Image (cartoon, rainbow, N blue to C red):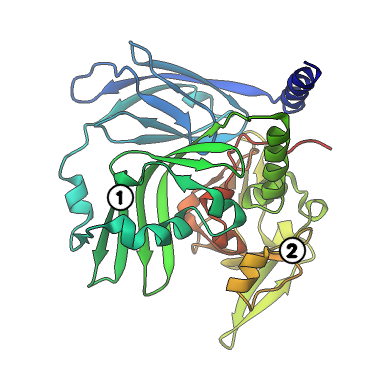
Amino acid sequence: MKKIFAFVSFLLCFAQGFAQSSFVISGKVISTETNQPLQGASVFAQNTTLGTATDEAGNFRLSLPEGGYSLVITFSGYQTETVRISNTDVNNRSLSVSLSPRQKQMEEVSVVATSEVKDGWVKYGTFFLQEFIGKTANGTQAKILNPEVLKFYFSKKRNRLKVLASQALEIENPALGYHIHYALDSFVHEYSSEVSLYTGYPLFEEMTAGSNEQFLGWMQARKETYMGSILHFMRSLYNKTLKTEGFEVQLIAQHDERDTAIALKDAYTALHFFKDDSTEIAEVQPNQLRVAVIYLKAKPAEAYLQSNPGEPGDFQFSLLTFLPGESLGIEKNGYYFEQNDIAVSAYWGWERLADQLPYNYSPQSE
């Protein structure tokens, strides 16, 4: 009895320690075809544990911690819609969302010049898991519970693998204690460049711990995963605490076809950091398109060094590549946009879905 009480007490203290200000998003979801409400539509903040479903009148109400999010609205047989929301955008507090029926021909159009691979999971399953879920210690433990919904297409002409899913992937990540519902938009691997790109809509769900020890283990694993992550970096950049949090930023310039790292006296000036107090959004647009991010408080995982022997072993080195003329907006919770305007490589590129944490995650306070 004492052990159960101690576990409950810890949970209460944990929840109180992470108390955050919140805001409410509400709205209604209807069909463009019938103009009628859609009951049971899924509404969730992408890459969080926060979601709900519409009632019989198509209405929804969702409370979110302050910050920015991509709100995802899905309904079977209909196109998925996304809306960027923030606690400072009062105009988006009450939404009217119209969903259009999905055209049956869409999948055929999206895989033009490709052919479906028979026994695709047998041939490409292991490769897909490594590129999508990851090769890290967390990634090796995670698994897809419904691989039968995946379809694999290979184009010989383009030397490209494309993976689609007929329904949301159900992914179990026992290392961090999350079940992930992932609506995969598409996964593409270009063999010529050895680059994998995937898009989709993840919703995290807390797994139920079987014991106090397992719960504490998850809390520790999540904190270790968070430290040095891109989520940790974006929050540190937003709060102007890069140095104290263990991050160093350098710009990468090219001279005589050689890359040169430029040490910065003031990272925020070089990044053209600006925070709008009215919207609470920070914006960066660096002097160079490539930005090196060094995390000094942890070494790279041994598995990463083995597969990338030329990488430094005393710190974690990641690279952000910006599009020409594009800036990056950052919300207080670490959400950044437009996410397609920035490419992540090196250490952060090695970490995949199994090393992602939801935007409403907060590390345990010391």
Residue 299: which numbered mark, if any? Answer: 2
- What amino acid does circle 1 point to? Leu
The residue indicated by pointer 1 is 164
Q: Position of residue 54 (x, y in %)?
A: 38, 18
* In the image, farthest residue toward the bottom: 256
Side (left or right) of 334 relative to 84? right
Depth order, front residue of 208/282: 208
Count residues near mark 1 (Cα–Cα under 10 Å), then give few for <14, some for 14-19, many for 20+.
some
User: Which residue corresponds to the image point at 28% horizontal and 35% vertical from the top-left?
Assistant: 79
* In the image, farthest residue toward the left: 105
- What amino acid does circle 2 point to? Lys
- Which quadrant holds residue 175? top right
User: Which residue corresponds to the image point at 49% horizontal and 50% vertical from the top-left?
Assistant: 339
Count residues near mark 2 (Cα–Cα under 10 Å), then give few for <14, some for 14-19, many for 20+.
some
* Dot 1: element: strand
Q: Position of residue 274 (x, y in %)?
A: 66, 48
- Which quadrant holds residue 188? bottom left
User: Which residue corresponds to the image point at 31% horizontal and 28% vertical from the top-left?
Assistant: 75
